Image (cartoon, rainbow, N blue to C red):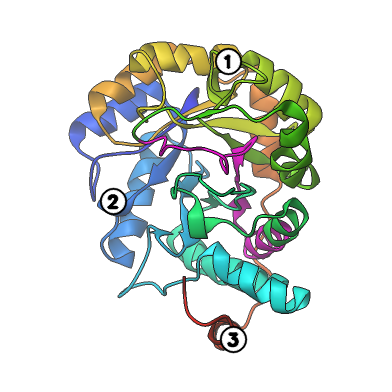
């Protein structure tokens, strides 16, 4: 298998996509709303994806946070609160915020496991600041690193109890970004000391997670030329060093406009900088082929990290879904509304 995760174009595999997947053997797949209609269709699509790479355990990822980042939603799946709801509850009573975060994640995990989705790109440990772009906004768990880390840990526990692996994002921090990385590259000029006290501090207590996703953000105090995703300096000194994360490191989407160069050049830069895995999301087959040509076979330390991550997934624990949803709804009511 090769060191990339890919999306596909629609609700079912095309013959071209199937041939590509058989030949290129990506490690895993990521789903978006364009891939989702009804539960039976999602289950069938996941079966097709795994059959194409002849791996019944191939990881299936999704961004299912709640709030405005929710790929599975009504009418077939419940709505979930954004991170700001947990922040509000935490400020009223710490235990309530953590309970709501854990319940929400546990319920999300139950939805995902029913479909065959095994990895959720959650929790966030980004710490937003005044003046930052709204791309994080209400997705965040607060503006104080200790609180953010505590809520992120509760989310992690909920997912893991439901048999779903978490992906920590966006390491080493997206909270200060003054632009949406889907469209342009943000540059953060904050001194390293302040970054370590705030942004990086939220990630350090979560360094034991099995997987993390990078931020397409330049931190000029650390590397004025490259965003974290393609910066060997930031990956080695900050992500692996200061923060201490030793798990599987995947890029954020390689097709985002924050990154410069062709898809092939970006893919090479991501791997060269020290990421274990390239993430490609938009389902465009020509770009998928570029990624597959550039990334290596998954071997060595990257393969060890990938295998170690998958080995951490456990069977879902017993769970009363109806009672949990009722309790979550009551807690959301205390926070005012779904953000």
Name the foreground residue: 24 vs 219.
219
Mark 1–mark 3 distance (CA, rounded to whole Å)? 44 Å
* Mark 3, residue position: 334
Q: Is residue 277 left or right of residue 125?
A: left
Residue lying at 73% horizontally and 54% vertically, measured from the top left: 149
Query: How many other residues sit within 10 Å of disc 2, few (<14), some (14-19) or many (≥20)?
Result: many
Mark 3–mark 2 distance (CA, rounded to whole Å)? 34 Å
Q: Indicate yes or no whether the magenta region holds residue 134.
A: no
Residue lying at 55% horizontally and 88% vertically, measured from the top left: 326
Name the foreground residue: 4 vs 58.
4
Circle 3 sits in a helix, a strand or a loop, which is it?
Answer: helix
Mark 1–mark 2 distance (CA, rounded to whole Å)? 37 Å
Circle 1 sits in a helix, a strand or a loop, which is it?
Answer: loop
Q: Indicate yes or no whether the magenta region holds residue 170.
A: yes
Mark found first going from the N terminus, 1 or 2: 2
Mark found first going from the N terminus, 3 or 2: 2
Mark found first going from the N terminus, 1 or 3: 1
Corner quadrant of residue 133: top left
Point out the residue furthest to the left here. Answer: 15
* Mark 1, residue position: 224
Residue lying at 54% horizontally and 26% vertically, measured from the top left: 277
* Mark 2, residue position: 35
Magenta-drawn segment:
153-182
Q: Is residue 250 left or right of residue 246?
A: left
Residue lying at 59% horizontally and 88% vertically, measured from the top left: 323
């Amino acid at each position: 298998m090769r060191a990339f995760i890919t999306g596909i174009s629609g609700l079912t595999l095309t013959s071209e996509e199937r041939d590509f997947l058989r030949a290129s053997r990506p490690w895993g797949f990521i789903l978006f709303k364009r891939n989702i209609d009804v539960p039976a269709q999602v289950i069938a699509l996941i079966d097709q994806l795994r059959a194409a790479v002849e791996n019944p355990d191939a990881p299936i990822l999704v961004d299912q946070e709640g709030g405005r980042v929710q790929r599975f939603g009504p009418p077939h799946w419940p709505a979930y609160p954004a991170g700001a709801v947990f922040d509000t509850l935490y400020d009223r009573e710490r235990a309530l915020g953590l309970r709501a975060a854990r319940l929400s994640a546990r319920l999300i995990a139950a939805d995902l496991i029913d479909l065959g989705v095994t990895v959720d790109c959650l929790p966030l440990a980004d710490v937003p600041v005044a003046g930052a772009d709204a791309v994080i906004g209400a997705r965040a768990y607060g503006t104080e690193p200790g609180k953010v880390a505590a809520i992120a840990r509760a989310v992690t526990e909920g997912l893991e109890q439901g048999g779903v692996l978490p992906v920590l994002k966006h390491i080493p921090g997206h909270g200060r970004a003054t632009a949406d990385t889907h469209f342009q590259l943000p540059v953060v000029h904050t001194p390293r000391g302040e970054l370590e006290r705030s942004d990086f501090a939220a990630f350090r207590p979560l360094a034991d997670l099995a997987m993390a996703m990078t931020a397409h953000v330049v931190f000029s105090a650390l590397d004025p030329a490259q965003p974290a995703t393609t910066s060997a300096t930031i990956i080695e000194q900050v992500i692996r060093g200061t923060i201490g994360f030793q798990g599987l490191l995947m890029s954020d989407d390689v097709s985002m406009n924050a990154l410069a160069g062709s898809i092939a050049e970006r893919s090479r830069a991501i791997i060269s900088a020290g990421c274990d895995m390239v993430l490609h999301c938009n389902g465009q087959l020509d770009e998928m082929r570029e990624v597959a040509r550039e990334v290596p076979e998954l071997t060595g330390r990257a393969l060890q990290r990938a295998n170690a991550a998958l080995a951490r997934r456990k069977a879902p624990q017993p769970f009363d879904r109806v009672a949990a949803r009722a309790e979550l709804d009551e807690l959301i009511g205390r926070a005012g509304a779904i953000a």
